[in-house]
Image (cartoon, rainbow, N blue to C red):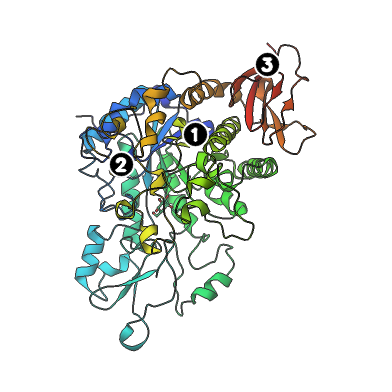
Amino acid sequence: MTEVLPIETPDALKDPTWWRHAVVYQIYPRSFADADGDGLGDIPGVVSRVDYLASLGIDAVWLSPFYPSALADGGYDVADYRNVDPRLGTLEDFDRMVAELHARGIRVIVDIVPNHTSDLHEWFQEALAAGRGSAARERYIFREGTGPDGAEPPTDWLSVFGGPAWHRVEDGQWYFHNFAKEQPDLNWDHSEVREDFLKTLRFWSDRGVDGFRIDVAHMLTKDLTEPLPSREELTLIPIDGNHPLIDRDDVHEIYAEWRQLFNSYDPPRTAVAEAWVASHRVPRYASPESLGQSFNFDLLEADFDAAQFRRIVTENLALAAESGSSSTWVLSNHDVVRHATRYGLPPEPADSTSHTRHGGDWLISGGDEALLDRERGARRAKAATLFMLALPGSTYLYQGEELGLHEVADIPEEERQDPTFFRTGGAEIGRDGCRVPLPWTADGPSFGFGASGAHLPQPAWFSQYAVDAQDGDPASTLSLYRRTLSLRHELQAAEELEWIETGRDDVLRFRRPGGWQVVTNFGTEPYDLTDLPGDAHVVLSSGGPAGSSVPGETTVWIAPVR
Ligand code: GLC
């Protein structure tokens, strides 16, 4: 494509507030669609499916990293921030994808990974070659070790993926990595690091990208003044803005600078923080002076439980109002067990440490099918999804959830890819199970994902979840998502939500603008709906036809009296 940069946003997509109530569909590019048949999904694959994306009724796509990467962490180890992995296509393919999506009214959000680079990034390679004390090492976090000959790491800190957080290089120095050892943390006190990310944000903004998802947004800045605390001491330091490693107040100096850059575009580029921080700290990331929006993972971490859902909605609407942002909602992404599966598992025992993020107890113990009630999981997932999509704010959907896909538990050890699996010696089974390539057709090689195989093995049961098996079937999960998204805009005229008391602690009911009502029955006993005014009636149900009562584990949307 010979477009002259910067690419103008089409007039139809210039509304600067679009993100407040957007439905954003997450594409994990290596597992979405494979156009060249090498087993890895790619950008031309996305282009080949733009009509499918448009048929869903989404407002934007968010692409997980598609940059050059050795895939030590599914692409979150970025070797070059301003390019496309040659296995996934070219910058021209990327431009074509943006143009095709924009032409269908779909915006594009890309993932920015600023906490760490890949160890193959030219900066890190330079740092290795230049040796201790060099300027090149200053861009990362290199330290001398402790103990005789410095053979012990500088501290006993653990990486998020398990195992030590320091790795020793050939000349004996150690570098810090919050995640895998192939993901060295950057030194955000360094002006070149700051400048280079501004360049990257400008690069993609100029290519017409509408917004950014900021990976581990709460970890960039660090206070590594010596002496460094031990692991135990670290856990005793409150996370209140001054913790050495997490959610420091000074990270917002970076985002204030980014915000100026975002606002220099028409419309302003948007950003959403992936910040796993305490709820009361979220508004800092979501404020208009910072990134503008932040993921809220509360629903994703909650049980299918009315009291928990109500508390989460109330709290997060208040937090969003406090920051001047809108709330965000999400039930599934590339880091967690798919919600259809989560809801079909027995509840975690109260004394277990939560493994929801990277595993789920069932998956950690190796995938015991007998514990999973697939139908119940699917029923609850649809009910929770219709509940979520009726809320004020913006919603993030993860590829494959519109097909009702379950987690794939039985991936053979030798085919696993997630570093959490390897770094915990298999104790955590990792995130591959939600990253298995999508089934597009019930038959054929890799269920229509590509012309040959898929880079993670697809189970036989994927066939019945394929897009072509659901397309046109009014009872399918895919049809339910499409119908819900086509009605959703009617509820989003304003951002108010008013609870209606139901007299039942397992039933939630609320009113949205225009007189819409939504009821979710989290229990198993039907909930009576005989109090509906005039000709108000159920127009949408997650569980098949609903008449004068809402069946168990079901959500209905009730259209106003006309
Ligand atoms: C974020 C990503 C996750 C990745 C990690 C390190 O949590 O969502 O997939 O492994 O950051 O980049």
Residue 19 numbered tag: 1
Task: Report the amino acid beneath label 2.
Answer: Arg
Location of the N terminus by quadrant is top left
Residue 541 numbered tag: none
- Left or right relative to 175: residue 308: right
**Disc 2/disc 1 C-alpha distance (Å):** 25 Å
Dividing the picture into quadrants, the one containing residue 84 is: top left
- Which residue corresponds to mark 3? 537
Task: Report the amino acid beneath label 3.
Answer: His
Dividing the picture into quadrants, the one containing residue 191 is: bottom left
Q: Residue at x 57, y 36 (%)?
A: 376
- Left or right relative to 245: residue 310: right
- Left or right relative to 408: residue 347: right
Task: Report the amino acid beneath label 1.
Answer: Trp
User: Would residue 303 be seen by someone viewing this image from the given angle?
Assistant: yes
- Which residue corresponds to mark 2? 30
Mark 2 or mark 3, which has the lower sequence index? 2
The residue closer to the viewer here, 250 or 437, is 437
Q: Residues within 10 Å of mark 3 (few under 14, many from 20)?
A: many
